[in-house]
């Protein structure tokens, strides 16, 4: 017969946990703050804990786009970074507070088996919108539009937004306040002190922010996407090396992400190296450079009195040096470099 303490333990282990996710976007810092229930391994069990996560805005969206929801290891990486609770509403999982290691492993396997196709379909809808909004496929007709203008086109034309098809108004709530105040008690101070503090910090007091709440990750991904398109000089890119989506850290024209690719090195670290190797292994394109070089050199030697030919040859060598430098730094692609050579 169970004692009262055992009954309490069983209740805690079997009670349902909250799947509500909170998202706060700081447009000034361009960061996203998430609060949700996650699972932490304690001895041989996985126990639910409250987690606050902050990253550059767009990180959750990119991680969702990069996850292969039909591959167990990829899903494990996603829920390790975030949580099963973020997928609970879509997959209709009923979660509890504690799982054994075997139970937790089985839960992820069932998620992939039963909901992998559904999650992949949702992901493809968001990829379709992201590709259009940030012109990942470099469409000529929208290259001069901002991402906000493209969003307008996407929602007002026959080419409807696929991501917005997942929007459900009754699954999204808005609350006042930022995440730093959600789980901490207020400091009660004297009113006169508060007045003085308000005067001193008048330039630091920002408009009251809104926190978005939902138990459906699709709603928050839509909010995140709309926040991004409202920001100036902000892009989502697709890595030229690994093909994953990422948010550039410093420059919007970055070509490579910071994901580990091989031997502990990131795409950004090995991207330019691979470009150089491609050049070395491609005789035709090396021949293009040699042909241009030889053409300008011979023309200069055969016409020593023509100072313009000599100047053009020197300019070519300097311009080529600059183009190679841009190539090494990822500012131009290998194809753009070859196209430049062919245009001389």
Image (cartoon, rainbow, N blue to C red):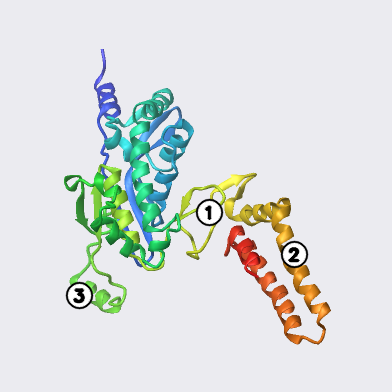
Look at discs 2 and 3 and give the one toward the viewer. Answer: 2
Q: Label 2 belongs to which residue?
A: 291
State the image quarter where residue 139 is shown: bottom left
Task: Find residue 192 and name its label.
Answer: 3
* Residue 214 or residue 127, whichever sits in front: 127
Task: Find residue 257 and name its label.
Answer: 1
* Residue 330 or residue 35, whichever sits in front: 330
* Label 3 secondary element: helix
Q: Position of residue 54 (x, y in %)?
A: 39, 54
**Disc 2 to disc 1: CB gap under 8 Å:** no
Task: Find residue 234 and name its label.
Answer: none
Residue 319 falls left or right of residue 83:
right
Answer with mark 1 or mark 3, whichever residue precedes in sequence.
3
**Disc 1 to disc 3: CB gap under 8 Å:** no
Look at discs 1 and 3 and give the one toward the viewer. Answer: 1
Number of other residues with Cα within 10 Å of mark 1, as a class: few under 14, some 14 to 19, many 20 or more: many
* Label 2 secondary element: helix
Viewer can see residue 50: no
Look at discs 2 and 1 and give the one toward the viewer. Answer: 2
């Amino acid at each position: 017969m169970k004692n009262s303490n055992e009954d309490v333990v069983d209740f805690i282990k079997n009670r349902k946990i909250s799947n509500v996710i909170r998202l706060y976007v700081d447009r000034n810092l361009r960061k996203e703050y998430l609060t949700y229930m996650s699972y932490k391994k304690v001895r041989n069990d996985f126990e639910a804990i409250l987690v606050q996560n902050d990253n550059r805005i767009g990180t959750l969206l990119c991680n969702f786009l990069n996850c292969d929801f039909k591959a167990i290891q990829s899903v494990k990486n996603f829920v390790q970074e975030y949580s099963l609770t973020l997928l609970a509403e879509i997959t209709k999982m009923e979660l509890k507070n504690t799982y054994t290691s075997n139970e937790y492993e089985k839960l992820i396997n069932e998620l992939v088996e039963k909901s992998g196709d559904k999650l992949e379909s949702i992901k493809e809808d968001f990829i379709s919108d992201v590709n259009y909004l940030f012109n990942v496929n470099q469409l000529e007709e929208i290259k001069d539009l901002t991402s906000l203008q493209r969003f307008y086109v996407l929602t007002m034309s026959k080419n409807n937004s696929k991501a917005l098809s997942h929007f459900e108004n009754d699954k999204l709530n808005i609350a006042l306040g930022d995440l730093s105040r959600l789980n901490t008690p207020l400091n009660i101070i004297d009113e006169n002190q508060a007045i003085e503090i308000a005067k001193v910090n008048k330039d630091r007091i920002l408009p009251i922010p809104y926190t978005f709440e939902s138990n459906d990750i699709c709603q928050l991904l839509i909010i995140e996407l709309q926040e991004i398109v409202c920001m100036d000089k902000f892009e989502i890119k697709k890595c030229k090396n690994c093909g994953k989506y990422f948010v550039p850290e410093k420059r919007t024209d970055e070509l490579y992400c910071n994901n580990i690719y091989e031997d502990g090195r990131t795409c950004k670290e090995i991207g330019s190296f691979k470009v150089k190797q491609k050049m070395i292994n491609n005789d035709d394109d090396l021949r293009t450079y040699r042909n241009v070089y030889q053409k300008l050199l011979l023309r200069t030697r055969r016409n020593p009195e023509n100072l313009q030919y000599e100047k053009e040859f020197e300019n070519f060598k300097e311009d080529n040096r600059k183009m190679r430098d841009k190539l090494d730094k990822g500012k131009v692609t290998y194809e753009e470099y070859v196209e430049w050579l062919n245009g001389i």
